[in-house]
Amino acid sequence: MDATTRLASSSTLEDVLAVAARRTVPGDDVDLAVAVWEGDEDVVVFAHATGFHKEIWAPTVRALRAMDVGATLVAVDLRGHGDSPEPDRGPSVWDYAGDVARVAETFGRRGRLVGVGHSLGGMAVAGCQARFGPFDAVVVIDPALLPPSAVEAMRTVGNPWAEAARRRRPGFETSEEAYRTFAAKEVFSTWADGVLRLYVEHGFRQTRDGWMLKCRPAWEAATFSQEDFGEVWEAVEGLGGSVTLVTAEHSVTHPNELAEETAAHLGADHVRLPGITHFVPMEAPEAVAVEVRRRLGR
């Protein structure tokens, strides 16, 4: 199977990953790991959520190929995640936005260029568009864009996401133990078939201490505690009609009122997906693919 072969909806997620080229995008402080599904002159850049990795986009890639979308698809491991190392300094929303910009610059000099991001990745894509403007269109999915009132509440009342990350178990003896542990948790019960296995197989690495998370809990907690969250909210105001905001009916980050506020702040088209939680690409990759295809003009 060559790199441009369309993947049927029956393909396994590992089949999808097997046809991706593994590349590195060099940088001054961090070299970024990317997976590339070669295609035509249009390019889509995908950025994942906090604690996840580029391989988590395989279900969306499969859905796009099954829809006969032939664009070149590029998924990046943001700094400190997946196969991209941590930098010497702590995380910043603008560094994450810069990661997306670097990938867009590397791959996006051909046809239409679309940025797609989930949660942290949505914030990074939106911040990248606000500061650098490389994309013809963006799709942000339950993005980590917080109004000043929410940022202030996290500083004064507490940050539950950072606290949960600090308590996260850093590893397991085996990948199978990790999979069984996660499979028993209700939060993962809504994920599409095979996606949890995908997360476990590619979100950890084998070390002498066991099967350990690639994104360290300390780095994840620091990402949830970034001081410049408020800055990116102000920067993305009025990004306009080239933006699609996708939110989930049962999102823990975007209840109805905040989802509407975010859409109005961005000036975005707003798609609210019923019956879905915050883990939109893991639960409804076909719905994500539909919005990406629309932004490609297909």
Image (cartoon, rainbow, N blue to C red):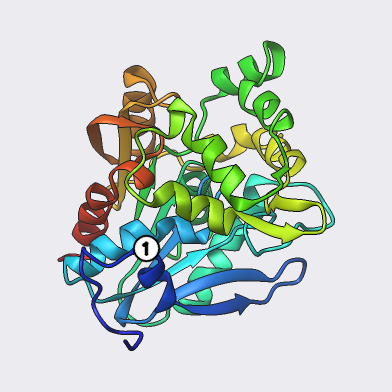
Q: Nearer the viewer, residue 251 or 267?
A: 251
Residue 164 in view, yes or no: yes
Q: Quadrant of residue 261?
A: top left
- Return the x and y of residue 149 as percentages of the image width and height: 56, 17
As drawn, which residue projects farthest toward the bottom? 2
Q: Residue at x 55, y 20 (%)?
A: 150
- Return the x and y of residue 264 as percentages of the image width and height: 32, 31
Neighbourhood count class around disc 1 (C-alpha, 10 Å): few under 14, some 14–19, many 20 upward = many
Quadrant (top left, top right, bottom left, bottom right) of the N terminus: bottom left
Q: Residue at x 47, y 55 (%)?
A: 198
- When the figure is inspected, residue 144 is found, relative to residue 100, above or below; the finding is above
Quadrant (top left, top right, bottom left, bottom right) of the C terminus: bottom left
Element type at marker 1? helix
Name the residue tied to disc 1. 13
- When the figure is inspected, residue 65 is found, relative to residue 127, above or below; the finding is below
Residue 159 appears left or right of 3 = right
